[in-house]
Image (cartoon, grey):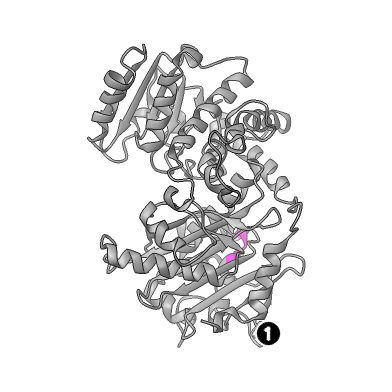
Amino acid sequence: MSLFARHVTRVPSAFSSRRCFGSKVTTTASAASRLSQINASELREVIGRNKRAFIVYDETRNQFETSNLEFAQLLEAFNVNQDAISCIDEDQALQRDWDKHEGLFLEIGKDTNAIHGAFVHKTKRGAAAGGVRYWTYENLSQYLCDGLRLSRGMGRKNALAGLHWGGGKGVIWREEEHPYTDRCFRDTLFKEYGEFITSLQGCYVTAEDLGVTVEDMRQVFSTTRFSTCVPQELGGSGNPSIKTGHGIVAAMEGALAYHDDSLHGKTISIQGFGNVSQAMVRHLFEYHQKYQIRSIYATDINREVLSVADQIRNQEFAGVDIDLKVDIVPFGDNTALLREDVDIVSPCAVGGTLNADTIPRIKAKYVVGAANNQLLDDVADDQRLCDYERFYVPDFLANRMGIVNCSNEQYGRIEEDDAILRHLGKSYENSIYMMVHKVFGRSEQDNIPTGQAANVIADELMTHTHPIWGHRPWHIIQSLVKQEWHKRK
């Protein structure tokens, strides 16, 4: 008996003679939830002897196509009837996170046996673009949900930024037996991933994300040209965290200016004092005459950041009159978000910190941060922020500068590049500042939460085709299917 036969109700036999399936596959919520019983080893069995598998969705024909029947039974999880779901949890989230994605490609590494994935959302604006993460997952449901959700988020981020990229995400499943701290293993792993990306012929362009380092990207770049965020010495853009920190400040400016206010005399509380937060704070110190922030409070779980705060306060900007305090807190502590004496809270640590527990207790008027997936529930918590009259700048709008910094590496680098800096200004129509105004305006006009307003604007922009190449990435995907990509390894 097959793994999917054990874990998931089978696709009706009427669909099983070909690899093409109509999008309305009868299923139940429990069918999707059973994906949580499939681990990485079992997924390798499902992928099969070719060590490659795909699911492709053709929106014009409203039809799926997949590499093999075993893999086709994932389609059930994409089609859970919402009426059957009273409370979507991680095991039943695929129907929520699947948004007519154009393609999902998986490959088993030839040397590491690792599971490499590429998730492609909408690509009318251009090739799917987004970083690859190397992370742990308890089951197949978690793995797929992460890739689907993040690739859609990247599509929206790229669209709001006015970039000619679609939404994409790479995900490598980190398993317990991986010697992931070993440099030789990582070199092999990321070279494999680069070869996998090369095989997709440019429908997805990868970059750096969670669990991946600049040295890892060097290895990826050694086996594929479809990569950004490569080291500066190889012609890349290098560390994007500095510009990302500056972008958070621009988002704060935009949010306050929408209400005829400014950063002058304001207090900020930051959850997480990592690279992006440090860049944001340095920017506020360096341009104190412009912003005139009164005080900054931050928390972090790493004691090493105390020396960074001391360096900023007493060495780099000793003459600047900003009260900066950093406290060390245990993991999961939300002190920074719940302070009563601040104007802006800035989630810059882990995701999910804006939720049913924290939102009612947030006293700050504005919520603007760099962390990805800040809302634990994208719909309910977005509405909850609105109900409590908190002005939330969606994370995929505020933290865009990472992808902006590396998005056009292929066109060369310029010192003080206007193609990058215009996103931090106030005149470019797609700048962070201007887009915050558009999102807040749409929220007010349609009486919807700001997260939903940003999604509506982004989804409209994602329908615009690339001015030169049209919907070329989709044609590449169709070509991969026609060439039987899954058999060509």
**Residue 69 sits in which quadrant?**
bottom right
Residues shaded magenta:
78-83
- Residue 112, horizontal then vertical, whole percent: 35, 74
Asked if residue 191 lies left or right of residue 162, the reply is left
Figure check: 29 above or below 401: below
The residue drawn where x is 63% and y is 41% is 161
- Residue 360, horizontal then vertical, whole percent: 46, 29
- Residue 155, horizontal then vertical, whole percent: 61, 51
Q: Is residue 452 visible?
A: yes
User: Is residue 79 magenta-colored?
Assistant: yes
Figure check: 39 above or below 98: below
**Residue 25 sits in which quadrant?**
bottom right
Quadrant of the drawing holding the N terminus = bottom left
- Alpha-carbon neighbours of circle 1 within 10 Å: few (<14), some, or many (≥20)? few
Figure check: 167 above or below 290: below
Residue corresponding to mark 1? 14
Relative depth, front residue between 225 and 278: 225
| Disc 1, SS | helix
Relative depth, front residue between 466 and 333: 466
Q: Is residue 153 visible?
A: no
Three-letter amino acid code at the position of disc 1: Ala
